[in-house]
């Protein structure tokens, strides 16, 4: 195959491997077949255009116009001119599909349904990336920059899915390495034949047994290996160093063991505003709880405790195994009334989140799967791809019921707590601190300051709740929010937390869900529109305490009301703006509960309510069938090298026993090739620069064969020399037996791993790729033959 033909094939393979990272985004994944077919046509037309040859710019133009025609035929055929030309109506149809696809991406959770708009975005994106890779690597023969569009394709998948996974990264990186190696081979081959090297032969014969075709030689092959190793390390090592994992981004810890791994997750605020604006309040989870105050049952995902000036984000924290019972909440004193409740929660299969929604503070979690515990935020993080999809779990948690006097009497937080949770960036507008000081003027303690801040947003400041406002989270967005007085929970919570920090009160922002809506069967349903963010302020002796500054959302905590009611609201979706009774200092459990047990969360009812059955219908039968068929297909692909090797060995050892000299030659060479491939499968790579006799001695030495096995190798090598060089070669006998003897000897000297690999993943199976390469070259040659009669345009291309 020509150098450009190899590059075109490798560019096609690299693009397709990188596109595989987008398979988890859409269900079903049949779009990849369509994209591969269209990409092959695009690549083939480019190869033909370069054969003519056409000028480079004309080649790119032809490929681009072909891509537009193919997309028109597939997605806008009804509006196309004469069925395939992209006229104005077809272009408008494609534009409408792209707009609809963008809306669908924001509407659906991963995996999204394969709507026409999403399919156009995927297939069109792969074709455009493929065109960019083909242009850089093949048309302009510069493979290194072609990695940028491949990286862009992988990065989109990783960004949308929160990490595309180790397998997809390896596949994309392998495609790029393959492209680089193909370009290196093409460049070196232009220098001609290198002295003393070996050529890759489809028959596996030594260089002395057949004419060399000028292919890369031993130094070139060694250079490729060194290059592959260096590039592999350059790609893999930095990646594995990120967040203790492979392109972590998913928030999962790495491995087991206390304190191992760190959180590095996608900020859930990215989708919060989109969830609030959904036309349909799709259920994400349901639960049952024995809490006496359902309006306070917030499901918390994680806490954002770092304010960089451009955004609020979670800190990188160490992870550990989930303890049987979680440690006591930070700062909670024994004299604060608490009640332990139990809840059964079911997540929908359409809801996939790395963090596990939990009531705060949870004390015990019973759940299956791979989860890790982050102590500071008291959150559970999925490990090794674990998500909340379809999760069913039981949670014990505390209802902390401080009184206003306890909050007002809270002492100062520790120096480390203030140092970490009162930091504000220098970019924060001065108006934030000035407004905080003005609003809290006259307050004598942090509790009174916090209540004044909450009331400023929820009641006194004339703020308006509006989910259409741009959801900026940085310093500039906070300044705009204070001026416009219009926003949604993100703006209210972030601004109150920032103002509290300017006053010296430790603060962070929690993200999760409000209690949801009660159902007729007694369960609670939580939908996308229940997504919420709220500030948590720290008070020594009470711990992290929830506040609710967002008007018309959630419920105002009883300990912040001047006259708190004695009972909870029957409607958890409505805030409580006023009440008439004084807050109770006692928990709903027995008043005789000792403070020590109360602090450990042993007070209150322990009777768990019945589990809320998930309303998700489960996995469709069609999906199960497709998954099973896909698994079988993957298994068959993995076993293809094994099947091919068994078939080839059987054919070589049972060669038809003809009587002509040609038959004798074929039998002898087949036996020699089988010995060479057997040694290769067990780690003794072929060296085609050696004569059969020297190659046999090398197999004996490296394979540590005994005298009988060594004699068998030399007999076959001698037979090869006879059929190739002797004027009247003698017919050899017992070749199959000699091959089996050598095979047994090589297997006996190899270790267990080498023997298993020789069977399951034989190295000699690379000959299949060589054969496919030769077939592709022949096909390209036949296609090019039809163009030879056409007039040729002058080209500036060289080499």
Image (cartoon, helix red, strand yellow):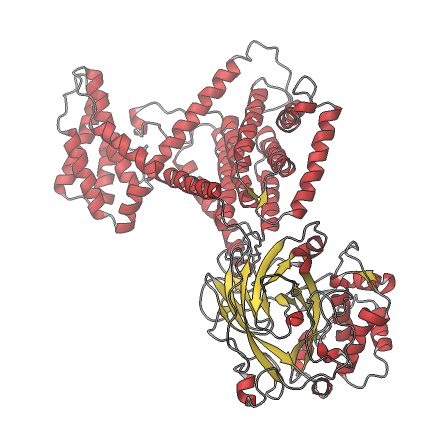
Quadrant of the rendered structure where residue 555 is? bottom right
The answer to whether residue 778 is above or below residue 225 is above
Q: In the figure, residue 378 lies in which quadrant?
A: bottom right
Which of the two residues, 179 or 248, is positioned nearer the viewer here? 248
Q: Position of residue 144 (x, y in %)?
A: 57, 39
In front of the other: 108 or 74: 108
Q: Residue furthest top?
A: 789
Q: Is residue 622 left or right of residue 514?
A: left
Tally the marks. 0
For this rendering, which residue is in front, 476 or 439? Answer: 439
* Rendering coords of residue 696 (x, y %): 22, 36
Residue 627, position as x, y percentages in the image: 45, 43
Q: In the orientation shown, which residue stands out farthest toward the front? A: 520
Can residue 715 be seen in this snapshot?
A: no
- Residue shown at 30%/28% (left/top)? 205
Task: Tell me what residue is drawn at x 14 percent, y 33 percent.
Answer: 737
Where is residue 147? Give x, y as percent. Answer: 58, 41
């Amino acid at each position: 195959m020509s150098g450009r033909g190899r590059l075109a094939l490798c560019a096609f393979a690299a693009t397709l491997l990188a596109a595989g990272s987008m398979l988890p985004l859409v269900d079903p994944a049949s779009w990849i077949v369509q994209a591969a077919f269209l990409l092959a046509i695009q690549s083939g037309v480019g190869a033909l255009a370069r054969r003519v040859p056409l000028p480079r710019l004309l080649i790119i133009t032809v490929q681009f116009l072909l891509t537009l025609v193919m997309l028109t035929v597939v997605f806008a055929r009804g509006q196309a001119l004469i069925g395939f030309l992209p006229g104005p109506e077809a272009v408008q149809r494609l534009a409408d599909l792209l707009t609809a696809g963008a809306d669908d991406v924001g509407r659906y959770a991963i995996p999204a349904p394969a709507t026409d708009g999403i399919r156009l975005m995927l297939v069109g994106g792969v074709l455009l990336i493929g065109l960019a890779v083909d242009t850089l690597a093949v048309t302009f023969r510069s493979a290194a920059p072609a990695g940028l569009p491949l990286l862009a394709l992988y990065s989109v998948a990783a960004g949308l899915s929160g990490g595309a996974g180790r397998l997809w990264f390896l596949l994309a990186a392998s495609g790029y390495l393959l492209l680089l190696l193909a370009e290196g081979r093409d460049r070196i081959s232009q220098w001609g034949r290198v002295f003393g090297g070996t050529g890759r032969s489809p028959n596996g014969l030594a260089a002395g047994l057949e004419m060399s075709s000028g292919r890369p030689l031993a130094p070139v092959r060694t250079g490729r290996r060194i290059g592959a190793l260096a590039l592999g390390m350059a790609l893999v090592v930095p990646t594995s160093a990120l967040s203790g994992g492979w392109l972590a981004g998913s928030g999962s810890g790495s491995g087991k063991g206390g304190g191992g791994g760190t959180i590095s997750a996608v900020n859930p605020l990215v989708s919060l505003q989109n969830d609030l604006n959904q036309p349909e309040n799709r259920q994400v989870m349901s639960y049952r709880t024995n809490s006496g105050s359902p309006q306070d049952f917030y499901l918390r995902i994680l806490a954002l405790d770092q304010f960089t000036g451009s955004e609020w984000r979670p800190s990188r924290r160490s992870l550990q195994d989930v303890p049987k019972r979680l440690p006591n909440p930070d700062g909670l004193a024994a004299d604060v009334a608490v009640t332990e409740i139990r809840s059964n929660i079911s997540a929908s299969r359409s809801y996939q989140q790395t963090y596990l929604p939990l009531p705060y503070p949870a004390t015990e979690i019973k759940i299956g799967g791979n989860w890790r515990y982050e102590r500071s935020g008291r959150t559970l993080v999925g490990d090794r791809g674990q998500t909340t999809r379809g999760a069913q779990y039981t949670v014990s948690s505390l209802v902390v019921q401080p009184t206003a006097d306890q909050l007002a009497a809270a002492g100062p937080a520790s120096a480390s707590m203030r140092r970490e949770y009162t930091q504000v960036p220098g970019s924060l507008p001065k108006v934030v601190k000035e407004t905080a000081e003005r609003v809290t003027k006259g307050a004598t303690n942090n509790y009174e300051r916090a209540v004044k801040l909450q009331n400023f947003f929820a009641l006194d400041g004339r703020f308006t709740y509006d989910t259409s406002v741009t959801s900026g989270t940085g310093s500039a967005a906070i300044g705009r929010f204070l001026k416009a007085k219009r926003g949604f929970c993100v703006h209210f919570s972030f601004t109150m937390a920032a103002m509290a920090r300017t006053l010296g009160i430790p603060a962070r922002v929690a993200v999760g869900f409000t209690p949801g809506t009660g159902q007729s069967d007694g369960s609670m349903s939580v939908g996308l529109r229940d997504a919420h963010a709220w500030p948590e302020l720290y008070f020594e002796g009470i711990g992290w305490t929830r506040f609710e500054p967002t008007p018309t959302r959630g419920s105002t905590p009883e300990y912040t009301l001047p006259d708190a009611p004695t009972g909870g609201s029957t409607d958890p979706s409505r805030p409580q703006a006023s009440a008439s009774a004084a807050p109770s200092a006692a928990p709903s459990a027995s008043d005789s509960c000792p403070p020590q047990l109360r602090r450990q969360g042993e007070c209150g009812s322990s009777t768990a309510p019945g589990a809320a059955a998930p309303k998700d219908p489960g996995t469709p039968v069609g999906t199960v069938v497709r998954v099973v068929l896909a698994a079988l297909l993957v298994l068959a692909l993995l076993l293809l090298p094994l099947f091919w090797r068994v078939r080839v060995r059987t054919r070589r050892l049972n060669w038809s026993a003809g009587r002509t000299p040609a038959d004798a030659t074929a039998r002898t060479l087949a036996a020699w090739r089988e010995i060479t491939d057997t040694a290769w499968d067990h780690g003794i790579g072929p060296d085609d620069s050696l004569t059969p006799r020297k190659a046999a001695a090398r197999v004996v030495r490296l394979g540590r064969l005994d005298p009988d096995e060594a004699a068998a190798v030399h007999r076959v090598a001698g037979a090869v020399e006879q059929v190739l060089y002797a004027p009247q070669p003698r017919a050899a006998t017992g070749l199959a037996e000699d091959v089996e003897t050598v095979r047994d000897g090589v297997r006996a000297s190899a270790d267990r791993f080498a023997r298993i690999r020789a069977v399951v993943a034989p190295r000699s199976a690379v000959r299949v790729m060589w054969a496919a390469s030769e077939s592709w070259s022949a096909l390209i040659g036949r296609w090019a033959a039809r163009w030879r009669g056409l007039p040729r345009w002058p080209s500036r291309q060289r080499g």
